[in-house]
């Protein structure tokens, strides 16, 4: 009876509609819960957002006005658009409706930032004496509160709980309300600290660039390329999902958007081929989330990491290669083993795009090539490089016959870029509040002392504690804002000499664990999006996606303890090759242990042993590699030679 039920589930190829997906996203994803506009209000809101996108490009590339004025105008516009976009609670369906209290908050909230912009020179001249002005203190308080409420609406409560706890601690240390307001609003140690500054300087441009890439048809090109490259092999549709999502996700900057975009095509394909709904959704969610760690773009995080760490962008992109390869190799192997276990085949060759057809459209990749070249060569600033890349994307889109960039689609891209910027900028602003509280109270040293005490000086325990913090703080937060929060709060702790984690390894560690929050239950937004398309159980999808993305939970510990995997302190190319090959074999062993199939079902005890061997190989080191390789080779040979019906009895005693 169980087998019959399983067959019904496997071959049920029905999928959810976009209405189903939107309903799920509005329930779980605050960023998807937006107001509905039609007619003239729709035109006015669209015009405002298009205007903001133009302003952001001009501001980042050409304007050299007073930084305090630039930042406050920018955030004032974000607050204005934010309250026009996000309602006070979930489930608001009324068309063209904004409650009077939202209008009031929107006006006085954005007005507070514009007030600062107008009086920026006075603020600078008064300096600390500004705390004596009731007007300036009230304006600052209103601005902070309006930003906090907007964050609750579009980002969520986890980050606000952290910020609230730190603010409470700040007051408990004896700091007065005027001093806190001045620090958080009228200096560059709070809201207008590094996270918001990099948003103004270039991150918003990269977000707009990502939307232009989507409108020029590069996402469709990636899917067709993936079909051509791996579609004919065993379990083809799932492998297509892995490859396409890796390529699309690196530029999109949103694992949820990537899951919905490519998943609407790949998930139905996987279900039709016989993959279970939860597995199909999990593959797409895990691969889409992994797109954020895929160099050279890394969802714009590579550029942020260069800013926070002080390393060159090309260095960041190069060091991210091996961990990204391991991540996607782990998913790819799991997909292959699942296909073998179920007995699937690939997509019929006649249904696949031809390589020579794709070659004719290779020009669609030109915007990405131009961006990477300009940023890597330091020819121009990041903002100017992003602006040039946007212009190239527009030109490419005009010549794309399959998905031509019309004037309407051009404005759609600008509007989408502006709307997508709201959540990122707001989250970065709250990250600035968190950073400001830590700075003004000297809490960083106390947090470090607490973590060292809890871990008893053991680095591995400190890493586990940091991992848990990153996953909690990263729940529901977009990639770029996610990394800003982690870089401001968690990375400095790991970099302290008492723990001894290398600087770039610390940044990569917190980035990885912030990203996997999108597939880690209970708040696994990418998994929920995939589950809505596949008509699958969201929690089961999240757990399956976590298992598929196991490399993302193992590899960061490896390069934190031994940064050779990030090409740090390596002796030469031979060591790099050794590290890569041994880690790939280790990921294969771990995937086999989790999947439980290699030519035939693998007994539990052998799954445990081969998993240990895989962990030994993933960790760089000659001794660990040798022991792990011996274990894996022995078990693989044993499974190969016993994978016949004649030897089933021999294997049964191990179960």
Image (spheres, helix red, strand yellow):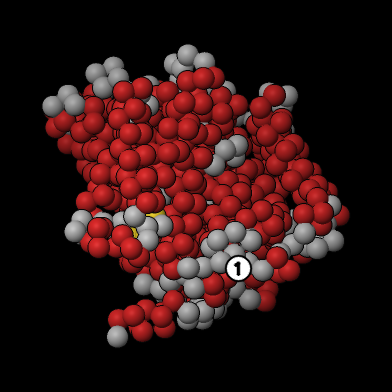
Is residue 377 depicted above or below 485 in this figure? Answer: above
User: Which quarter of the image is occupied by the N terminus?
Assistant: bottom left
Q: Is residue 426 left or right of residue 399?
A: left
* Residue 72 visible at all: no
Reading the image, the residue beneath label 1 is 265
- The quarter of the picture where residue 40 lies is bottom right
Residue lying at 45% horizontally and 27% vertically, measured from the top left: 579
Residue extending furthest toward the top: 571
**178 or 424, nearer to the observer:** 424
* Residue 283 visible at all: yes
Q: Secondary structure at mark 1?
A: helix
Q: Position of residue 134 (x, y in %)?
A: 36, 39
Q: Position of residue 496 (x, y in %)?
A: 30, 21
Q: Position of residue 130 (x, y in %)?
A: 39, 30
Residue lying at 19% horizontally and 26% vertically, measured from the top left: 458
**67 or 390, nearer to the observer:** 390
User: Which quarter of the image is occupied by the C terminus?
Assistant: bottom left
């Amino acid at each position: 009876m169980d087998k019959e039920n399983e067959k019904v589930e496997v071959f049920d190829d029905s999928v959810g509609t976009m209405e189903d997906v939107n309903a799920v996203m509005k329930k779980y994803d605050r960023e998807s819960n937006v107001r509905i506009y039609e007619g003239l209000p729709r035109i006015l809101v669209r015009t405002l957002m298009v205007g903001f996108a133009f302003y952001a490009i001009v501001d980042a590339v050409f304007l050299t006005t007073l930084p305090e004025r630039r930042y406050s105008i920018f955030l004032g516009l974000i607050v204005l658009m934010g309250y026009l976009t996000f309602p006070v609670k979930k489930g608001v369906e009324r068309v063209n409706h904004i409650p009077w209290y939202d209008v009031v908050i929107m006006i006085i909230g954005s007005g507070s930032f514009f007030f600062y912009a107008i009086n920026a020179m006075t603020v600078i001249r008064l300096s600390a004496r500004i705390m004596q002005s009731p007007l300036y203190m009230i304006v600052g308080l209103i601005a902070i509160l309006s930003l906090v409420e907007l964050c609750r609406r579009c980002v969520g409560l986890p980050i606000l709980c952290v910020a609230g706890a730190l603010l409470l601690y700040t007051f408990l240390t004896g700091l007065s309300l005027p001093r806190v307001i001045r620090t958080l609003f009228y200096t560059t140690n709070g809201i207008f600290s590094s996270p918001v500054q990099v948003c103004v300087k270039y991150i918003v441009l990269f977000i707009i660039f990502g939307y232009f890439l989507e409108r020029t048809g590069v996402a469709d090109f990636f899917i067709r390329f993936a079909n051509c490259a791996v579609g004919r092999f065993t379990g083809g549709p799932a492998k297509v999902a892995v490859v396409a999502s890796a390529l699309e996700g690196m530029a999109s900057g949103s694992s949820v958007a990537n899951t919905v975009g490519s998943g609407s095509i790949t998930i139905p394909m996987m279900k039709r081929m016989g993959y279970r709904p939860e597995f199909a959704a999990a593959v797409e969610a895990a691969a889409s989330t992994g797109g954020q760690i895929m160099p050279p773009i890394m969802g714009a995080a590579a550029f942020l990491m260069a800013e926070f760490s002080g390393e060159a962008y090309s260095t960041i992109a190069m060091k991210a290669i091996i961990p990204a390869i391991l991540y996607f190799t782990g998913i790819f192997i799991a997909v292959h083993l699942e296909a073998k276990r179920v007995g699937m085949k690939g997509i019929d060759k006649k249904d696949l795009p031809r390589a020579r057809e794709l070659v004719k459209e290779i020009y669609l990749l030109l915007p990405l090539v131009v961006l990477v070249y300009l940023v890597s060569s330091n020819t121009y600033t990041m903002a100017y490089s992003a602006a040039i890349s946007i212009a190239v994307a527009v030109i490419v889109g005009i010549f794309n016959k399959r998905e031509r960039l019309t004037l309407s689609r051009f404005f759609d891209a600008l509007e989408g870029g502006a709307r997508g910027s709201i959540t990122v900028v707001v989250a970065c602003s709250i990250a600035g509040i968190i950073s400001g509280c830590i700075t003004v109270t000297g809490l960083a040293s106390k947090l470090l002392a607490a973590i060292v005490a809890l871990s008893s000086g053991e680095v591995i325990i400190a890493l586990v504690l940091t991992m848990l913090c990153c996953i909690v703080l990263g729940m529901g937060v977009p990639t770029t804002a996610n990394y800003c929060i982690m870089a401001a709060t968690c990375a400095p702790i790991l970099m302290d000499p008492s723990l001894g984690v290398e600087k770039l390894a610390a940044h990569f560690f917190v980035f990885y664990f912030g990203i996997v929050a999108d597939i880690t239950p209970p708040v696994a937004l990418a998994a929920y999006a995939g589950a809505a398309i596949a008509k699958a159980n969201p929690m089961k999808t999240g757990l399956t996606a976590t298992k598929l993305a196991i490399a993302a939970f193992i590899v960061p510990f490896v390069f934190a303890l031994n940064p050779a995997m990030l090409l740090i302190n390596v002796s030469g190319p031979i060591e790099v090759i050794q590290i890569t090959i041994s880690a790939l074999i280790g990921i294969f062993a771990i995937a086999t242990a989790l999947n439980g199939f290699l030519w035939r079902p693998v007994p539990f005890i052998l799954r445990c042993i081969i998993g240990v061997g895989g962990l030994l190989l993933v960790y760089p080191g000659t001794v660990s590699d040798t022991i792990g390789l011996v274990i894996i080779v022995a078990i693989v040979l044993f499974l190969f030679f016993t994978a016949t019906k004649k030897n089933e009895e021999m294997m049964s005693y191990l179960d």
